[in-house]
Amino acid sequence: MNAPAPNAKDVNATAATWLVRMNAEDWSEDDQKMFDTWLVQSPAHRAAYWRLKAAYAETSRLQALRRPQQGRGPRKSAMPFLAATAATLIVASIVAAATISFAPQSSERYATQVGGSKTLALRDGTRIELNTATEVRVSLTKTQRTVWLDKGEAFFEVAHDAQRPFIVMVAGHRVTDIGTKFLIRHDPARLEVAVVEGKVGFDSSDPASRAQPLQLAAGDVLVATPHAITVKAKREEDLATELGWRRGMLIFHHTTLGEAAAEFNRYNGHQLVVGDSASALTINGVFPKNDVPAFVRLAQAVLKLRVEDQGHQTVISR
Amino acid sequence: MADTTSETSREERGNALNAPVNASEVEAWFVREVLPLESMLMRFLHQNWRNKADIEDFRQEIYAQVLTAAESGLPERAKPFVLTTARNLLIDRVRREHVVPIDAVSDLDALGVAIDEPGPERNAIARDVLRRLQDSLDRLPPRCREAFTLKRLEGLSRAEVAQRMGISERMVTEHMAQAVCQLADMLYGEPLDTRSKP
């Protein structure tokens, strides 16, 4: 999503070269000007330069006890890598789970456009709220209720019916409702299931990971990628943040500018592009999901960023 | 729009002065307060991030964020500020990665603990800086060490160093630059207790 910040090694090497050249005999006024320009360009430049300059200054102490060069080769670095010991909990692995889409003919299809939303009230009393750019198919029979979430994000409030299980098929996985409210977000490489109330069963339909179905309780958030499925507990307010779109709002809490822009881009045709240096800034705030201008104004006025409207997109940078 | 926005959690900075701080003050603060925390910061990053290739970039990003904040008001206490910045960076990265490293996710709450953990005392670092400098110099690649020693410690000109070593002046600059980078890593980044000589 976001390009990484400029490579630290390169910045460091540039800073070191400036430092060394500055301490040589042929440092000119023009060099100084170029260096000054480089230094004000970015806090990363200043950090790298000041750090090396401080280390370089420290080495003057060595002049005091100058000694003849030693013929010793370099010792092996004693840098210990403190291995993290946290237990790894990979519940199951999905190997490129093929989307299972053998929907019966009787299914009905519902979709929203980018920026759209729609609430489906099913005959059984279940409500499904579709978020932006979402597609579902719904099939209700006497013995089973099935929804295929083909893409996008949906919030489910399921009417309990012990005789007719409610199943959501998504990216080859099966989410079984046990009387509950839950959210499923289906992005191309990532699936998220967040349980707001009640319980939900999760069954990966990849044959290689037939281990056992998981049961998720309120507050649990499951994230499935092509490589792993992880489950963690989220606080209520964090879940509320994710559900802000149901009220037409995007809620950011310690969210990076890059992530916030990506959220806006899910809802709006006019895309935001955030430059490397600005994307790591952290923001808090609540915005109407289609109010890109408000967000841009804020970036400009509060964060003092440069904003350039290029017609189909707006570029935000330092 | 509702709510307010703020850059890098201002509340973490204690009662910061809100006037812009001039560059030399920021630099002095950075060298005096932040660099001595580097070995602790590196340990923190190594403990909480599996992909070691990211760590140097993280350090840079953390320093850049710390400086950006300090330029509009020096934080009252450097350590909690640096570690909070580090923690937020890891959290952001965890959120952004498509493949979530479960160990990082499950430990995020535990990261809060580390912020209050006592760090190395600055004067303890200063006390043996000379020994560690010497040790670091000894561990440089031979050509880097030679160039650095001749230029910085013997005071030869770059042309003289080049002649003495039989290399171009440009190579002298390169060796010197590499030496400075490695010395800084050893001086600031390495855990204190492994710097002692065998």
Image (tube, coloured by chain):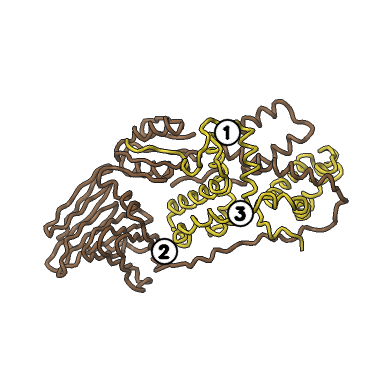
Chain colours: A brown, B yellow
Q: Which residue occupies 65% across, 52% down?
A: B121
Instruction: Name the residue tied to disc 1.
Output: A41
* Label 3 SS: loop
Exactly how many numbered labels are in the figure?
3
Q: Which residue occupies 43% across, 55% down?
A: B98
What label does residue A228 carry, if any?
2
Residue mark closest to the camera, 3 vs 2: 3
Callout 1 environment at 10 Å: few (<14), some (14 to 19), or many (20+)?
Answer: few
In-image side of A68 versus B127 (left or right):
right
Q: How far across and how far down the image is residue B6, in percent?
A: 43, 38
- Which quarter of the figure is the C terminus of chain B placed in? bottom right
Q: Which residue occupies 13% across, 58% down?
A: A125
Residue type for callout 3: Gly
Instruction: Name the residue tied to disc 3.
Output: B119
Q: Decide which of tag 1 and tag 2 comes sooner along the chain.
A: 1
Q: Which residue occupies 46% across, 57% down?
A: B108
Q: Could you tell me which chain the residue with mark 1 belongs to?
A: A
Q: How far across and how far down the image is residue B49, in percent?
A: 53, 57
